[in-house]
Image (cartoon, grey):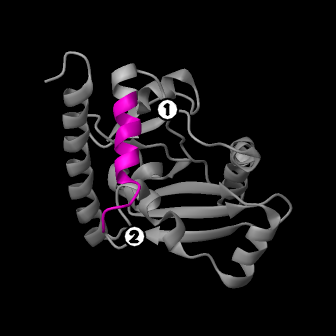
Amino acid sequence: MIIVNCDQNTPEWYEARIGIPTASGFDRIITTKGEVSKSREKYLYELAGEIVTGEQFIGYSNGNMDRGHEREQESREYYEFINMIKMDRPGFCYFDENKEFGCSPDGLVGEDGGFETKDAAPHIHIDRLENGWSQAQYFQQVQGSLYVTGRKWWDLQSFSRGFKPLVVRFERDEAFIKTLAIEIHRFNNDLKKLVEKYSIGGK
């Protein structure tokens, strides 16, 4: 693992991510069942555009997403307080020196763990507390983060101000990670061909 030490959502962070698949987008490459995602082609085009232009693709955002970014530190501090720990927060993690894909952990816990927080509207958070929170919703992102970092487990926290948080722990799914690795490799090969085909000076 290669770590870029910078604050997330800064120019340095965006630069580290340009043109490569990241864990938050792995669900656009592969489904929870290990099948090709219907969003794969669009994701290819977006990343090819970033490579050619050197500019970040600006995707959809709304007030709830902006609020989630604002409360991320609050959620992380709550997790640290409850567990009596202090997490590291790297800016960006590449899988290896080739820097072809990576992830942005919300926290790294000791030598073995990781942390991801999701801010939730009150009604969504209550539903999760009452009825449970399926691992399927962020399965690819979390398993992808486990793959990139080599960690053994990852805690996913649902956070809503004023409510008790809900934490779901993921263990490594080696069968899925093996399939994910193959599909990321295929995706990056297709991405390279796409850029070479359509960029000025390409083949």
Q: Residues within 10 Å of mark 1 (few under 14, many from 20)?
A: some
- The reply, left or right, for residue 149 in relation to residue 193 is right
On the question of residue 112 being in view, the answer is no
Residue drawn at x 31%, y 62% as measured from the top left: 36
Q: Give how far across and how far down residue 142 sits, in percent.
A: 46, 60
Q: Give how far across and how far down residue 25 sits, in percent.
A: 44, 50
Element under disc 2: loop
Q: Which mark is residue 32?
A: 2
As drawn, the residue found furthest toward the left would be 203
Q: Which residue is mark 1?
A: 57
As drawn, the residue found furthest toward the bottom would be 131
Q: Which mark is residue 162?
A: none
As drawn, the residue found furthest toward the top would be 201
Q: Quadrant of the N terminus?
A: top left
* Amino acid tagged 1: Phe
Q: Nearer the viewer, mark 2 or mark 1?
A: 1
In this view, the residue in front, 49 or 165, is: 49
